[in-house]
Image (spheres, helix red, strand yellow):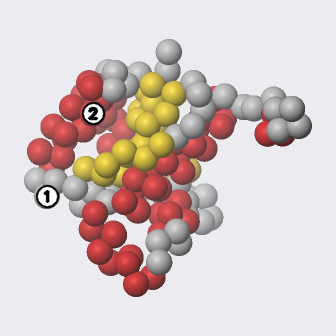
Protein backbone atom coordinates (compact mmCIF):
# COMPACT_ATOMS: atom_id res chain seq x y z
CA UNK A 1 0.00 0.00 0.00
CA UNK A 2 1.34 3.41 -0.98
CA UNK A 3 1.15 6.14 1.67
CA UNK A 4 2.38 9.49 0.40
CA UNK A 5 3.39 12.61 2.24
CA UNK A 6 3.26 15.74 0.10
CA UNK A 7 5.66 18.50 1.11
CA UNK A 8 5.65 22.14 0.07
CA UNK A 9 9.15 23.18 1.19
CA UNK A 10 9.83 26.61 2.55
CA UNK A 11 12.49 28.27 4.64
CA UNK A 12 10.11 28.94 7.54
CA UNK A 13 7.39 26.31 7.13
CA UNK A 14 6.78 22.91 5.57
CA UNK A 15 3.30 22.47 4.16
CA UNK A 16 2.13 18.86 4.40
CA UNK A 17 -0.54 16.69 2.79
CA UNK A 18 -1.39 12.99 2.92
CA UNK A 19 -2.66 10.66 0.21
CA UNK A 20 -2.79 6.99 -0.73
CA UNK A 21 -4.26 4.66 -3.39
CA UNK A 22 -7.66 6.29 -2.99
CA UNK A 23 -6.06 9.06 -5.04
CA UNK A 24 -7.18 11.95 -2.85
CA UNK A 25 -4.74 14.34 -1.20
CA UNK A 26 -5.79 15.92 2.09
CA UNK A 27 -3.99 18.71 3.92
CA UNK A 28 -2.21 18.10 7.22
CA UNK A 29 -1.12 20.76 9.70
CA UNK A 30 2.01 22.53 8.45
CA UNK A 31 5.26 22.27 10.37
CA UNK A 32 5.86 25.81 11.62
CA UNK A 33 8.58 25.24 14.21
CA UNK A 34 11.08 28.09 14.15
CA UNK A 35 14.01 25.78 14.90
CA UNK A 36 14.97 23.69 11.82
CA UNK A 37 16.01 20.76 14.04
CA UNK A 38 12.61 20.74 15.74
CA UNK A 39 10.90 20.94 12.34
CA UNK A 40 12.94 17.96 11.11
CA UNK A 41 11.99 15.96 14.24
CA UNK A 42 8.33 16.82 13.69
CA UNK A 43 8.60 15.67 10.07
CA UNK A 44 10.15 12.38 11.19
CA UNK A 45 7.26 11.90 13.63
CA UNK A 46 4.70 12.39 10.84
CA UNK A 47 6.56 9.98 8.54
CA UNK A 48 6.63 7.35 11.28
CA UNK A 49 3.08 7.86 12.57
CA UNK A 50 1.52 7.72 9.10
CA UNK A 51 3.84 4.88 7.96
CA UNK A 52 4.79 6.90 4.89
CA UNK A 53 6.15 4.93 1.92
CA UNK A 54 6.79 7.81 -0.51
CA UNK A 55 7.64 11.49 -0.16
CA UNK A 56 6.37 13.93 -2.79
CA UNK A 57 8.26 17.20 -2.81
CA UNK A 58 7.37 20.37 -4.65
CA UNK A 59 9.99 21.50 -7.17
CA UNK A 60 9.73 25.27 -7.78
CA UNK A 61 10.89 25.54 -11.37
CA UNK A 62 11.06 28.90 -13.12
CA UNK A 63 8.33 29.72 -15.61
CA UNK A 64 10.80 28.98 -18.45
CA UNK A 65 11.36 25.42 -17.09
CA UNK A 66 14.83 26.22 -15.72
CA UNK A 67 15.94 25.34 -12.20
CA UNK A 68 16.77 28.43 -10.18
CA UNK A 69 18.13 28.67 -6.63
CA UNK A 70 14.84 27.54 -5.00
CA UNK A 71 14.65 24.48 -7.24
CA UNK A 72 18.24 23.57 -6.37
CA UNK A 73 17.36 23.94 -2.66
CA UNK A 74 14.42 21.56 -3.18
CA UNK A 75 16.67 19.06 -4.98
CA UNK A 76 19.15 19.21 -2.08
CA UNK A 77 16.28 18.68 0.36
CA UNK A 78 15.13 15.68 -1.68
CA UNK A 79 18.59 14.12 -1.34
CA UNK A 80 18.60 14.81 2.39
CA UNK A 81 15.15 13.25 2.79
CA UNK A 82 16.21 10.15 0.81
CA UNK A 83 19.24 9.74 3.06
CA UNK A 84 17.33 10.41 6.29
CA UNK A 85 14.26 8.24 5.68
CA UNK A 86 15.44 5.76 3.04
CA UNK A 87 12.24 6.42 1.10
CA UNK A 88 11.63 7.34 -2.53
CA UNK A 89 11.31 11.09 -3.03
CA UNK A 90 9.33 12.22 -6.05
CA UNK A 91 9.85 15.79 -7.29
CA UNK A 92 6.73 17.45 -8.73
CA UNK A 93 6.59 20.76 -10.57
CA UNK A 94 4.95 23.14 -8.13
CA UNK A 95 4.83 26.33 -10.17
CA UNK A 96 2.01 28.57 -9.03
CA UNK A 97 0.67 26.15 -6.38
CA UNK A 98 1.31 28.61 -3.53
CA UNK A 99 -0.35 31.36 -5.55
CA UNK A 100 -3.31 29.07 -6.31
CA UNK A 101 -3.59 28.06 -2.65
CA UNK A 102 -3.37 31.66 -1.45
CA UNK A 103 -6.15 32.67 -3.87
CA UNK A 104 -8.57 30.53 -1.83
CA UNK A 105 -8.04 32.77 1.22
CA UNK A 106 -9.82 36.15 1.53
CA UNK A 107 -7.30 38.98 1.07
CA UNK A 108 -8.03 40.44 4.52
CA UNK A 109 -7.01 37.18 6.21
CA UNK A 110 -3.96 36.23 4.13
CA UNK A 111 -1.32 37.71 6.45
CA UNK A 112 -2.54 35.88 9.56
CA UNK A 113 -3.27 32.69 7.62
CA UNK A 114 0.16 32.67 5.97
CA UNK A 115 1.92 32.40 9.35
CA UNK A 116 -0.31 29.46 10.34
CA UNK A 117 0.95 27.35 7.45
CA UNK A 118 -2.55 26.75 6.03
CA UNK A 119 -1.51 28.10 2.63
CA UNK A 120 1.62 25.93 2.67
CA UNK A 121 -0.42 22.80 3.40
CA UNK A 122 -2.94 23.69 0.70
CA UNK A 123 -0.04 24.03 -1.73
CA UNK A 124 1.30 20.64 -0.56
CA UNK A 125 -2.16 19.20 -1.22
CA UNK A 126 -2.10 20.51 -4.80
CA UNK A 127 1.41 19.12 -5.33
CA UNK A 128 0.45 15.71 -3.95
CA UNK A 129 -2.82 15.62 -5.90
CA UNK A 130 -0.88 16.16 -9.14
CA UNK A 131 1.34 13.21 -8.24
CA UNK A 132 -1.59 10.97 -7.25
CA UNK A 133 -3.44 11.82 -10.47
CA UNK A 134 -0.41 10.57 -12.43
CA UNK A 135 -0.06 7.42 -10.32
CA UNK A 136 -3.73 6.48 -10.19
CA UNK A 137 -5.43 7.86 -13.30
CA UNK A 138 -9.19 7.65 -13.30
CA UNK A 139 -10.79 5.66 -16.10
CA UNK A 140 -12.38 7.74 -18.85
CA UNK A 141 -15.85 8.87 -17.81
CA UNK A 142 -15.30 7.80 -14.17
CA UNK A 143 -16.17 11.29 -12.93
CA UNK A 144 -19.75 10.71 -13.97
CA UNK A 145 -20.00 7.05 -12.90
CA UNK A 146 -22.68 6.49 -10.33
CA UNK A 147 -24.28 9.91 -10.80
CA UNK A 148 -27.14 8.56 -12.94
CA UNK A 149 -28.01 5.65 -10.67
Which residue is located at x 47 percent, y 78 percent?
106
CA neighbours of label 2 inside 10 A, class few (<14), some (14 to 19), many (20+):
some
- Looking at the image, residue 107 sits to the left or right of residue 77; the answer is right
Q: Is residue 35 left or right of residue 111?
A: left
| Horizontal and vertical percent position of residue 20 | 51, 27
- Residue at 60% over, 66% down: 63
Residue at the spot 27% in from the left edge and 33% down from the top edge: 46
Q: Position of residue 120 (x, y in %)?
A: 39, 58
Asked if the residue at tag 2 contacts the one at tag 1, i.e. Cβ–Cβ closer than 8 Å, the answer is no
Structural distance between the alpha carbons of marks 1 and 2: 17 Å
For marks 1 and 2, the one nearer the N-term is: 1
Q: What secondary structure is found at the residue carrying circle 1?
A: loop
The quarter of the displayed image where residue 149 is located? top right
Residue 50 falls left or right of residue 56: left
- Are there few (<14), some (14-19), or many (20+) residues within 10 Å of tag 1? few
Q: Position of residue 7 (x, y in %)?
A: 39, 45
Q: Position of residue 36 (x, y in %)?
A: 15, 50
Instruction: Quickly name the residue at label 2.
Output: 46
Local secondary structure at mark 2: helix
Does residue 17 lie above or below 96 as drawn?
Answer: above
The reply to whether residue 61 is in sight is: no
Which numbered circle lies on residue 125? none
Q: Which of the labelled discs sits on residue 34, or is there none?
A: 1
Which residue sits at x=37%, y=60%? Answer: 118
Nearer to me, 83 or 67 = 83
Residue at the outermost top position: 1
Residue 100 shows up from this direction: yes
Amino acid sequence: MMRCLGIDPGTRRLGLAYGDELGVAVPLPALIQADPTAREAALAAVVQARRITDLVLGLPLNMDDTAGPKAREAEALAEKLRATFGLPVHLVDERLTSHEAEATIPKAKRREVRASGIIDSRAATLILQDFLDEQFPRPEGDEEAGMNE
